[in-house]
Image (tube, helix red, strand yellow):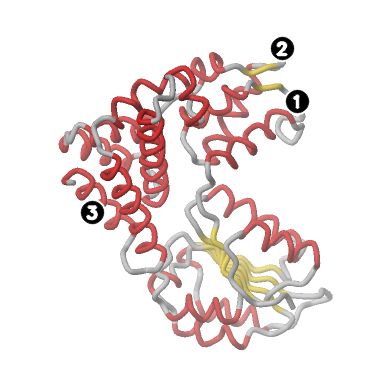
């Protein structure tokens, strides 16, 4: 069995278990980046078992995830196979708790591997801590812009998507992330559209991104930051409400707000260092057409205020991940505080 521990790098963790063939008895896959959660769920399950083997592979989803049925399946010996695999999705066991499953975790047979995929997590629940003790918690958090850019570019230049290679300008990659946002599912869909569009000419430009991709979530976050800098509470709250209606996860909103304040802090430093506007985009690693707006927003704060706001965003992130606060409430309280200070 794989060594039982929790690691920050969930992708490396699962890849290592797959490559070595040493698996833990139990996995909890969770986190803000749903694309990675879904991808690594499929990757892990395929490495564990033939998904067509219904005798040894059990799937329990949502309301059909009954503790007694899950335990009965997990306790049964595998039929002409090395192991039984139990996949449980969106059971809310890790939100509401489940004493039966919690008590069963230390007693999972060596011939069974359980994989939980959950979107609603309360790290204070005993079942969560029991999972860390007897299994693996793999958290897939939102990726930073540099990692996203590398991944997006790989989708264009490799044949993994649409079985065709298309070149892409670096500025187009960053423009796409700026336009679409950091959600990997949305980025994947937009890359598919752009590759199809550029099949004949063989290259994707920033102009193609502007023509084909709809700036929705990231645009609203950017506009919300502008409203925050102007202390326009009504517009800020309205834009936040729009993001909630678009079902933008609270943790991804927090990631984007934190990212934007980090950019504003770097902008403030660049202004004070008298970096020329033409060079600032390269220094900040943002599209050139956004520089004037970033300068305007940065000038609305002092350096000390921006440092305090970045720290407050990081404190909110810590409070959510530690289970001290519910994510949606924490983000709402953060926005109110950012408006008032």
Name the residue rendered at 76%, 65% in the picture. 49
Mark 3 or mark 2, whichever is nearer to me: 3
* Residue receiving disc 2: 200
Q: Quadrant of residue 44?
A: bottom right
Disc number for residue 333: 3
Q: Earlier in the sequence, mark 1 or mark 3?
A: 1
Q: Quadrant of residue 28?
A: bottom right
Horizontally, residue 101 falls left or right of residue 259, namely right
Name the residue rendered at 46%, 27% in the picture. 179
Q: Quadrant of residue 266?
A: top left
Callout 3: SS: helix
Q: Earlier in the sequence, mark 1 or mark 2?
A: 1
The residue carrying pointer 3 sits among few (fewer than 14), some (14 to 19) or many (20 or more) residues within 10 Å by Cα, namely few
Disc number for residue 165: 1
Mark 1 touching mark 2, by CB under 8 A? no
> What is the C-alpha distance between the residues marked 3 and 2?
49 Å
Mark 1 touching mark 3, by CB under 8 A? no
Callout 1: SS: loop
The residue carrying pointer 2 sits among few (fewer than 14), some (14 to 19) or many (20 or more) residues within 10 Å by Cα, namely few
Residue 338 in percent (x, y) is at: 23, 46
Callout 2: SS: loop
Residue 1 in percent (x, y) is at: 74, 78
Q: Nearer the viewer, residue 277 or 205?
A: 277
């Amino acid at each position: 069995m794989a060594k039982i521990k929790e690691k920050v790098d969930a992708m490396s963790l699962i890849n290592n278990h797959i490559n070595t063939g040493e698996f833990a008895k139990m996995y909890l896959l969770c986190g803000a980046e749903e694309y990675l959660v879904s991808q690594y769920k499929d990757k892990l399950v395929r490495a564990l078992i033939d998904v067509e083997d219904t005798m040894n592979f059990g799937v329990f989803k949502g309301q059909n995830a009954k503790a007694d049925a899950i335990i009965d399946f997990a306790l049964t010996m595998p039929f002409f196979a090395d192991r039984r695999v139990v996949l449980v999705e969106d059971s809310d066991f890790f939100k509401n708790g489940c004493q039966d499953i919690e008590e069963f975790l230390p007693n999972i047979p060596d011939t069974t591997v359980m994989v939980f995929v959950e979107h609603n997590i309360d790290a204070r629940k005993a079942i969560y801590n029991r999972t860390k003790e007897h299994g693996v918690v793999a958290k897939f958090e939102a990726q930073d812009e540099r990692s996203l850019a590398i991944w997006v570019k790989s989708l264009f230049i490799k044949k993994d998507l649409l079985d065709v290679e298309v070149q892409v300008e670096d500025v187009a990659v960053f423009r796409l992330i700026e336009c679409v946002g950091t959600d990997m599912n949305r980025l994947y869909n937009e890359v598919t559209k752009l590759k199809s569009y550029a099949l004949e000419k063989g290259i994707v430009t920033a102009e193609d991104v502007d023509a084909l991709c709809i700036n929705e979530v990231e645009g609203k976050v950017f506009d919300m930051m502008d409203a925050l800098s102007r202390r326009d509470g009504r517009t800020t709250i309205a834009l936040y409400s729009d993001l909630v209606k678009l079902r933008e996860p609270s943790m991804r909103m927090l990631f984007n707000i934190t990212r934007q304040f980090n950019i504003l802090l770097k902008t403030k430093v660049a202004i004070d260092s008298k970096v020329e506007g033409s060079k600032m985009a390269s220094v900040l690693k943002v599209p050139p057409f956004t520089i004037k707006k970033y300068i305007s927003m940065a000038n609305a704060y002092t350096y000390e205020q921006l440092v305090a706001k970045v720290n407050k965003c990081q404190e909110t992130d810590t409070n959510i991940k530690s289970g001290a606060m519910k994510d949606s409430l924490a983000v709402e309280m953060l926005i109110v505080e950012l408006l008032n200070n």
